[in-house]
Image (tube, grey):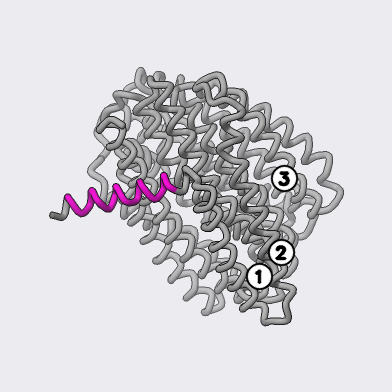
Amino acid sequence: MSSSNSSLKLVVFSSFLWRVAEKAGSSVVRFVTSIILGRIIAPEVFGIIAIIAVITSFIDVFIRSGFGKSLIQKENADDIDFSTVFYLTTAISIVAYVLLYFTAPIIANFFEHPQIVPTLRLMSLPMLISGLNIVQIAYASRNMLFDSFFWATLGAVIISSAVAITLAIAGYGIWTLVVHHLVGAVVSTIILWFTLKWRPKLVFSVQRMKNLYSYGWKLLVSNVVHNAYKQLRTLLIANYYSSADVAYFTRGRSFPALIADNSSRAISSVIFPAISKKQKSTETVKKMVRQSVSVTSYLIWPMMIGLAIIAEPLVLLLLTEIWIEAVPFLQIACIYFALLPFNETSTQAINAIGRSDITLKLKIIKTVIGIGILLLVVRHGILIIALSTIPTSIIFSLINILPNSKLINYRFKEQMADVLPYIGMSAIMAVIIYPIQLLQIPGILAMLLQIIAGAVIYLLFSLIFRLRTFYFILDTVKQRFAKRKITAD
């Protein structure tokens, strides 16, 4: 392996470790905070916040998608490009906030929740700093400064969680969750401001805007369309079922999302700028994508299958019987989220080589299919809606396979070889550890034994079958620590 490729691998893996550390650290804090808040605040309150989060996240995707990715993907982006995007997205953010502010009463009437009006107006305030935050993220990602993300995210989560727990104990109810959201967004932006060197310049180029727009608008539309589909599911549940049902559905999904969604975002946020730097070399791009798919599948599948196995005792331990109805949604979501890293990496590879047009086409196709399935099942119960996400996700994965086969010669057989072994190993591990919970021992002890046994079994499989991904992770970690030791000396 050439020194340049070795150096790139170390940079990418180091960046990945920073992102994993960021996501893992923040997830642990969020996890503990959610448990404490879940014991104090009623499920119905979480249901109202979930409805508002659907609306604000949809608008946020509209603001954030496109231009930020364009800055990362463009080979020679400079201060003019970054400043242009800053002023443009700031203007869009202000317009979006004003729109939500005045439409809040209409939204509240639709869901028959008057409290949505003040809550939505407050939870939308972070949009006003989105212009700065988008460029901060793009600058750090382009320059692989993922340690900045670590400190910004972890600092914001710790401070916002401390404030939220204090307010919850004091009995502020729904306002606890609102302030939690506000403080997290503001603190993160402030920390990035002090840790990054970039500052906006008094320049704006219409031509640069047009050039960035030619790539970014396709990502903008594709993300808005796909996000609309995802949020439609929650909105339909909120419309057809109670706010408690929404809370069980979203809380069940939140557990596996802490692991899979965060891991997926970590690898995609690293792989996109890394591939963008090597986008002209198809062979290098293919190797990076294969390694990404293999590593994430190796790590995610056993965790998701294991989490599904221990779902009930975990919910009883952490959230008590009040949330027991969230268990089946948690188990279903584990399978859905296990497929997410494959879909995310495939999409990022297409975007990084400049084919956002293909991403748009795929998102439209998948959205049409997803909405069609959703409309077929929406009246058949909330559990059926959750179950429908599994075949939907499988279909989405199959749709993503074809473009990568053509663009980077990542054939179907190779893609299956990079995923299926870990699914099989995880399934066998699950069959072995499941009977432990049938023993006449306390639930907590059984759960701990299942976690330990599952980890040992999976590690033994890795050694027995001499999995390349396992040894790749070991070798890369060794190289990273060896390089750090040399630097220290």
Amino acid type assigned to the residue bearing label 1 in the image:
Val
Q: Do the residues labelled 3 and 1 touch (CB within 8 Å)?
A: no
Q: The C terminus is located in which quarter? A: bottom left
> Left or right of 42: which side holds 187?
left
Q: The N terminus is located in which quarter? A: top left
Estimate the spatial distance between the alpha carbons at disc 3 and disc 2, rounded to whole Å.
Answer: 16 Å
Looking at the rendering, the stretch of residues picked out in magenta corresponds to 471-486
Residue 280 sits in which quadrant?
Answer: top left
Residue 248 image offset from top left, x and y in percent? 70, 62
User: Against 324, is 378 above or below?
Assistant: above
Q: Are marks 2 and 1 in contact (CB under 8 Å)?
A: yes
Residue neighbourhood size for the residue with mark 2, other residues' Cα within 10 Å, grouped as few (<14), some (14–19), many (≥20):
many
Residue to which mark 2 is pinned: 327
User: First in sequence: mark 3 or mark 2?
Assistant: 2
Residue to which mark 1 is pinned: 315
User: First in sequence: mark 2 or mark 1?
Assistant: 1
User: Against 284, is 36 above or below?
Assistant: below
Find out whether residue 485 is within the magenta segment.
Answer: yes
Report the front residue among 174 and 426: 426
Residue in the picture at 72% in, 45% down: 389
Residue 33 image offset from top left, x and y in percent? 51, 69
Inspect this view and state whether residue 114 appears.
no
Residue neighbourhood size for the residue with mark 3, other residues' Cα within 10 Å, grouped as few (<14), some (14–19), many (≥20):
some
Residue 167 image offset from top left, x and y in percent? 50, 74
Residue in the picture at 62% in, 60% down: 306
Q: Main secondary structure of the magenta part?
A: helix
Amino acid type assigned to the residue bearing label 3 in the image:
Ile
Residue neighbourhood size for the residue with mark 1, other residues' Cα within 10 Å, grouped as few (<14), some (14–19), many (≥20):
many
SS for callout 2: helix
Amino acid type assigned to the residue bearing label 2 in the image:
Val
